[in-house]
Image (spheres, rainbow, N blue to C red):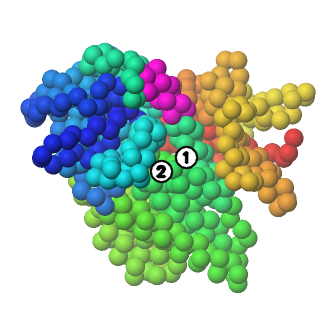
Amino acid sequence: MSIGLVAGLLTGAAAQIRSIGTQPLGGDPNAPQTAADKMANTPKYQKALKVFDRLVEARGDFRLPVPEFVMLKGKGNGRAAFMDYEKNEVQLDENAYNACIESGFDTAGLAFLIGHELTHYYEKHGWRDGFAKEYGDLPIGLKINKMVDKVANETEADYLGGFLAYSAGYGLFEKGPELIEHIYKAYGWGTESANYPSLSDRQALIGRTNIKLQYLVEVFEMANLLTAIGHYEEAYEYYRYVAIRYQSREIYNNLGVAKVLEAMDHFENNELVYRYPVQLDLSLSGGSKGSGAGEINRDTLLLQALLQFDAAISLDPNYAPAHLNKACAYALLGDMTRARFYAAEEARAAARKNNRYPKTAVDADVLLGILEAKSGNKDNAKKIFEAAAKDSSALAAINLKILNEAPLPKAPPEKLGLKAETIDGLKMSDVSHPSDNDLCPKFDDQKAIQLTSDLMFAQNPAPGANSKSKVYICINALNEARNKDPMTIFHFTNPDNTGKTAKNIALGAAREEIVKAYGEAPKTIESPIGQLMVYSKIIFILQNNRLVRWINYTTRGSC
């Protein structure tokens, strides 16, 4: 997601630069390039470097060497941003940096530019230009070097670079068309070119890509919610939809989590006394319980989960959540030796490296406490749970109560006349069947996505006249044959929501306040930075034990 910067190949007796995207789709790709001084240890460089480092960390793919980030002085070599494959450098011109800052887009604009170039690198777009240059005299070389191929790479870099910037915490950058215009003006590039799309066409490409990008983010969010409420088979398909388009350690991790949680539905209650710290990374239905075939099925699911965790670890060996989840899977398989190893040696070590995942390190201790308890070492388990609870682990506190056979806090008795849960004044019934004349939930046909032949994702971005809170709908045609409700509907709060729940809980509330009002959640799912508290009709999403979002949800039959 950046100002789509097109291939420009330097010719000369010296080595070639095999690269995609060296200047926006416009200007003269054959203009002579001049050497430029590098900027280092300046405030501008340091600010841009922080964005670069954050994007690399979010990508989490360390199979290839991480490129060096370079800022070039002034207009540098005439390219706003460039992936130099020979030097293995992501280059950003000072002039492009200034355009981001002066236009008011700040770090989000920088993430737009740098994420685009990093995507060229990770998606290996450079081979096309290198091939086309070296074999340009052959028909295949000429064909690959056509403009349509360059545009395809630029569009993919916009799309996946945008998802990278989103996953790094920069949000969905919707000002790409405006920023590219600022860049064109900063470099004095014309708006029309015989060999490349015009500025207006390039802006239109970015605009459409942003729409596709938003859909991908929303599918990932829906997958997380379906996982939270136990619709694991559906969640897996949602994650798979994303994984086909964008491979990251978080996606593979969450695919594995869906399988682990599905497997846990095949255990008897007395087999799962404690709550396991399986970590769903948000930065994206089980069958019957019992013995016999169920045991085979749950082991199969856990083995499938291990493959996904290994895929995540192959991208980033220091991705602590996948190591912890792998330990949980081995614990559920009954392999205590491997479970201890991955929790104590791999997960904790990765989590504590550069203090990347402090909560994961604590959750690894929680799992070790569970393993001690299951081995009959209750005194050791108690010490571990107590230490983790002092380290603000709500999960450790819950497991300590279970170990001590103490009851978990229950919700206070319901008051007469307690109002229904609402968001922006809308009850779930208002969004699931708006009126007697309109029994079906409304959704935007243009935003509907058919994930499989039986599974559709739909949404209503503005369910009420005074509401901008989104509604997501999962429609599973197979559920009717299974005697299940085919529709699952979620209604979100916005991050700036000023309302309160039916029991007077607002965003920013401490976990203790939620427990006092609603009782301890019957189901909790950990994340690397927080926890999901799942109740029968409402989900609370916490970060650092504070509420950052809540979601009302329901299921319903066909219209």
Task: Report the residue at 34% width, 56% height from top.
Answer: 61
CA gap, disc 2 and disc 1: 11 Å
Residue 430 in picture, x, y percent from top left: 78, 30
Q: Is residue 252 visible?
A: yes
Q: Amino acid at mark 1?
A: Phe
Up the image or down, 377 lies above or below 240; here it is below
Instruction: State the mark number for residue 246.
Output: 2
Residue 306 is left or right of residue 52, and the answer is: right
Label count reads 2
Q: Amino acid at mark 2?
A: Tyr
Task: Report the residue at 28% width, 37% height from top.
Answer: 8
Residue 418 in picture, x, y percent from top left: 74, 32
Task: Report the residue at 47% width, 59% height from top.
Answer: 253
Prevailing SS of the magenta stretch: helix
The span picked out in magenta is 197-211
- Quarter placement of the C terminus: top right
- 263 falls in the magenta region: no
Foreground of the two, 262 or 6: 6
Q: Contact, CB < 8 Å: mark 2 with mark 1?
A: no
Q: Earlier in the sequence, mark 2 or mark 1?
A: 1
Q: Which residue is mark 1?
A: 220
Up the image or down, 516 lies above or below 96; here it is below
Q: Nearer the viewer, mark 2 or mark 1?
A: 2
